[in-house]
Each structure stands twice: as structure tokens, then as C-alpha cells.
Amino acid sequence: MPAAGGHRSAVPEVTFAAPPIAAARGGRQHAGMDRSRLLNPLNLAALLTLGAISLSIRYFDEGSRPLAWCLLGLFAAGFLSLSLWPPRLRLAEHAVLAALPVIALALIALDPRIGTAPVLLVIWAGAVFADWPSRRAVLAVLAVNVAYYLVLKHAGGLRAPLMSVLIFIGFQAFAALCMHYARSAERARDALAQVNADLLATRALLADSARDAERLRVARELHDVAGHKLTAMRLNLRALADEPGFAGNAQLRIAEQLSGELLGDIRNVVQALRDSGGLDLATALRALAAPMPRPRLQLDIADDVRVTDPAIAEAVLRLVQEALTNAARHADADTLDVALHRDGDVLHVTIEDDGHVREGWREGNGICGMRERLAALHGRLRLARTARGAMRIDAELPA
């Protein structure tokens, strides 16, 4: 959006630590090809495990070693791609997660007597529980373990294939629990960060509102008390000057003149105190967006925008908050542009992201809450899907 009035500002991107192995469902960081995500603790443990498994390939039959190396390389490449993949390629990511156990089972089938390859299923189970819903992950792990049992039984060479499967199911369960608690901790951290941002934004508005209220109180006190008494004193000085005994008294005339000038100065101070610049929406909106790694907030606030009503400011705050959440969750956007300008007695808020909303989208509870909040303030809300598939929100509020 074009800058209007020179108030365009960009909120710096705040990056949180990436969750282990893969981002938790619904909270993936937009890190693009950020290789530092490979170094989170459970990812690093998985990479070390892959290195240890590679050492065991020398115990495979000489004829199957080249294929074993290829399979292990494919598994490692697929696993690494889960940490380096841009978040928009979710379908490709699901395909990789579905292919990894097939590669692991193929490696196990080459020589079931070597007990290192099944560890790949443990690594895969952790990745699945990090990225898929729990019910889908449980079903996938059970299906893969059935296939693992059939591979061991068909290949032969093991006296107790079921016991081997059960042992590795225990390891998989341990990995799944680790990922479950990692995901829970991440969700709690993100929720706490968002609540903290909400509190900071609200505190900024309350602080501005309190300062405006204090200025208004001081202005009233000056006008009602000092102004009233100065007016009374000036009237008395004029009456005294009309007395025959004080007629032509220079000091009395000067005192009356000074009282008039002082009364004018107080009126100017009162007017200055009443002329508030409005609540600081920019600071509050930046505080609200700061904990979110994406989308990045771009503000364009016109010079003539003055919001003095805390209810209007709160409505703008919640409108942008919902837009930020929807842009990250549903549109996978990188940037959210927010523009505020006045048109007479109407405050216009225009919000547009650079993401992509699917066809046939429907309004949820958050959008309904937006409409209700604006309707209570005699405002209105319009939503539209742009030609490039992004979401555009136009809101009008009484200025």
C-alpha cells in the first residue's frame, strides 16, 4: 500500500525457536530454508542416529550394500527436507512423511537380522507425531508396525518377530510422547506470548487513555477554579477602579491588565490540554504483532487519524489481531498491510495480506465477532477475496 502522511512503519520480525523435528501442527515457523532449524535438540539426536545407522551398513551382505546406502540416503534426505521445507508445500511434506516408512521397511527387508534399521521407524514416528494430528499419527504408526511385522515374518531368520516389533513400538511410543509434550509446550509458549502481546497492546491504550483523562481533569480544574477566581478578581479590580478615590491609579490599572493577560494564558493552556493527539494506535498494534513470526505487520496511518475513544481503539486492535491470526493460520501470508485514514467523520481501516485463501471459504467465529464488535459501535465490515487470492478487509468506524 502506498504510504500516506509518512507514518508507514514495519514491525521487525520476531523469530521463536523452532519446535523439535518439525513444527507443531498449526504453528510452523516461516523460516524458509533456515538451516539453523536442523540444530534443535531432537533433530540433532535424529541426525546422530542416522550417522550411527550408516556405520552398520558394512554388516549387510556385500551385494545389498549399494542399495542399503541409497535407501538410507533417501531417508536422510527426506527427513532433512521436513526441517528445511517452506511452509506452503504442505502436500509435498505429507507425501514425504508417507514415503519415509516405506523406505525404512525396504531397508529392514534387505537384512532383518541387523537390528539398526528399525530405528528409522522411531525417528519417523517422532516426525509424524510432530506434524500430524494425534489420531492420524496413531493409525499411521500402527499400520506401519503391522507392515514391519509382516516383513520380519516373511523374511524369516528371526525367532520372535513379534517381540522385536513390540520392543520398537515401545521406542516409538517414547518418541511420540516426547513430541506430544514438545508440541504442548510450544502451544503453551505461543499462547502465552500472544496473551502477553495482547496485554502490552491493551496497556499501551490504557496508558494513553489515562494520560488523556488526566489532561482533561487538569484542564477542567484550571478552567473551573483558577479561571473562575481570576475572572472574579478582574471584576473586582474593575469595580475598584471605578471608585472615585482610586480613579487614575496606575498600579490598579496594571493589576487589572495583568489579570486579564493571565486569564488568557490559562485559557490557552486549557485549550492545549484539551487538544489531544489521540491514542497511540501504532505502538499498540506493533506490540500486538511482535510475538508472531509471520505475517509481518506493515502500518500506514494517515496524519489526520485521531482516535480518542478507547472503545474505537479497542475495536481496531481486535480487528487487526483477528486479521493477523487468520493470515497466519488460513492464508499462510508473509505480510499484512494495515492502513488507517479518515474521510470526514468516518475512520476507514483497510487490511490486506499477501497470502492465498482457498476458494469457497466461509466466515468463522472470529469474523462474526468482528462484525458484532463493529456493529455495536455503529460501524460495518466488508470482506473480499482479491484477484490474486488474498483476503481484503474493509472496516468503517465513527471517527
Image (tube, rainbow, N blue to C red):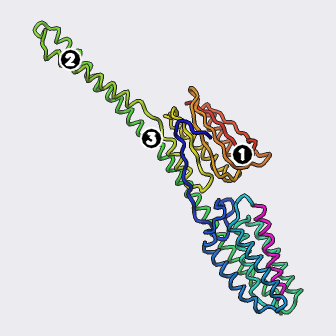
Residue nearest the observer in this picture, 177 or 238 = 238
Element type at marker 1? loop
Label 2 sits on residue: 256
Tell me where residue 89 sits by quadrant.
bottom right
Tell me where residue 88 sits by quadrant.
bottom right
Label 3 sits on residue: 208
Element type at marker 3? helix
The amino acid beneath tag 2 is: Glu
N-terminal of the pair, mark 3 or mark 2, is: 3
Element type at marker 2? helix
The amino acid beneath tag 1 is: Ala
Q: Is residue 32 above or below residue 397?
A: below
Residue at position x 47%, y 35% from top?
A: 278
Label 1 sits on residue: 390
Q: Position of residue 351 (x, y in %)?
A: 64, 41
Query: Magenta stretch?
Result: 90-111
Magenta highlight on residue 321: no
Q: Is residue 58 above or below residue 317?
A: below
Q: Nearer the viewer, mark 1 or mark 2?
A: 1
The amino acid beneath tag 3 is: Asp
